Amino acid sequence: MKKYFTVLLVCTCLLNQLVAQINTTLTVQSQPPANLSEWASRNTALSFVVDYGRPDPQPIIFKTEIKLLDGTIVATTDVQKLRSINLNRGVSVYFSKDVMPMEYLIFTGQYRNTIERTGKLPSGQYQICVSILQPGTFQVLAAERCRIFNLVGVQLPFLMMPVNQSIIPKLVAQNAITFRWTPVTPQSAIAPPTYRLQVFEILSNQQPVQALRANQPILDISLRGVTQYIWQPRLAFPTTDSTAQFIWTIQTLDANGAPILISDGNGESRSEPFIFKVDLNMGVKKN
């Protein structure tokens, strides 16, 4: 019994010596991308600096956890599947793709469903914690380091012009219609969003939402980072009605061409649509 105790004491002392010679520093961007897959391509999102003092290489794995501030686990790495890496003497810098590979992250409960559906975590405040473990035994070789980060909720653009239910004279509409909207917030200087402007004609037997869902757009254009567009429609308006009605909307897309906010009400990152009318008699010279 004494022999086993001695062996255990020696192993503990050696482990403590090893831990004492590993110093780590974790840095996390205060507002990183909401899409976690983007972290791997941005070294600025997360960096983990390891200063190792022993001359012999040490195999290690990283255990990473994403938590709420109250400690609730959102995601954790599957340490059973992680491949070990050799820690060499000196200072080494690791990034998100090293310490939190998406293929080995296990998400819990509602967060798993959200990640599978959108690739993003809900907006809110989180903390990420990284520790270094010994492969196989999973003993802690370096103390856990944690940092808080925020995922800011996205505010879709608000339509400004033409104003909802506004009336445009026929001659003005045939010459040029100016569309204007607010930018998505928060704005990203790294990857400006693409705004997809669509205009649909509302037929006489349709509700506005039906036109938006069923009709082919008479204008469908994508504009990167631009919040205004001047359209020269040159439309042939009917002569049987006094007005023609149109509905327009903005769809906001990310750098990959996907809706920037899949968890919004319509699931397409579309702004609330506006309706405008063209008065077919207003501005027309009468003989």
Image (cartoon, rainbow, N blue to C red):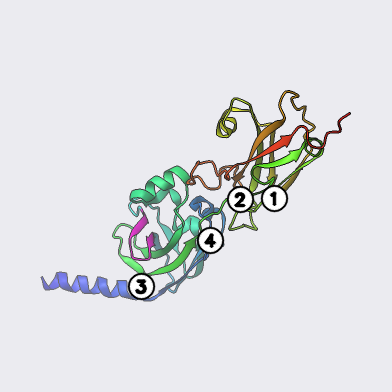
Q: Residue at the far front: name it.
A: 287
Q: Which residue is mark 4?
A: 45
- Measure the C-alpha gap from mark 4 to mark 3: 26 Å
**How far, Cα to Cα, is label 2 from label 3?**
51 Å
For residue 19, which numbered disc appears in the image? 3
- Who comes first in sequence, dot 4 or dot 1? 4
Q: Residue at x 76, y 24 (%)?
A: 239
Residue displayed at 59% across by 47% down: 254
| Magenta region, residue range | 64-77
Closer to us: mark 4 or mark 2? 2
Q: Nearer the viewer, residue 91 or 159?
A: 159
Which of pointers 4 and 2 lies earlier in the amino acid sequence? 4
Disc nearer the start of the sequence (4/3): 3
The percent position of residue 19, horizontal first and vertical second, equals 36, 73
Which is nearer the eye, 8 or 81? Answer: 81
Numbered disc in front, either 3 or 1: 1
**Quadrant housing the N terminus:** bottom left
2 or 3: mark nearer the eye? 2
Is 52 colored magenta in this rendering? no
Disc nearest the viewer among 4 and 3: 4
Disc 2 designates what residue? 157
Near mark 1 (Cα within 10 A), the count class, few <14, some 14-19 or many ≥20, is some
Three-letter amino acid code at disc 3? Val
Where residue 147 appears, as percent x and y from the top left, is 44, 68
Q: Count the marks: how many?
A: 4
By secondary structure, the bulk of the magenta-drawn segment is best described as: strand
Q: Residues within 10 Å of mark 3 (few under 14, many from 20)?
A: some
Question: Could you tell me how far apart the alpha carbons at marks 1 and 2 are, in whole angstroms?
Answer: 9 Å
Magenta stretch contains residue 69: yes
Q: Nearer the viewer, residue 95 or 2?
A: 95
Q: Which residue is mark 1?
A: 227
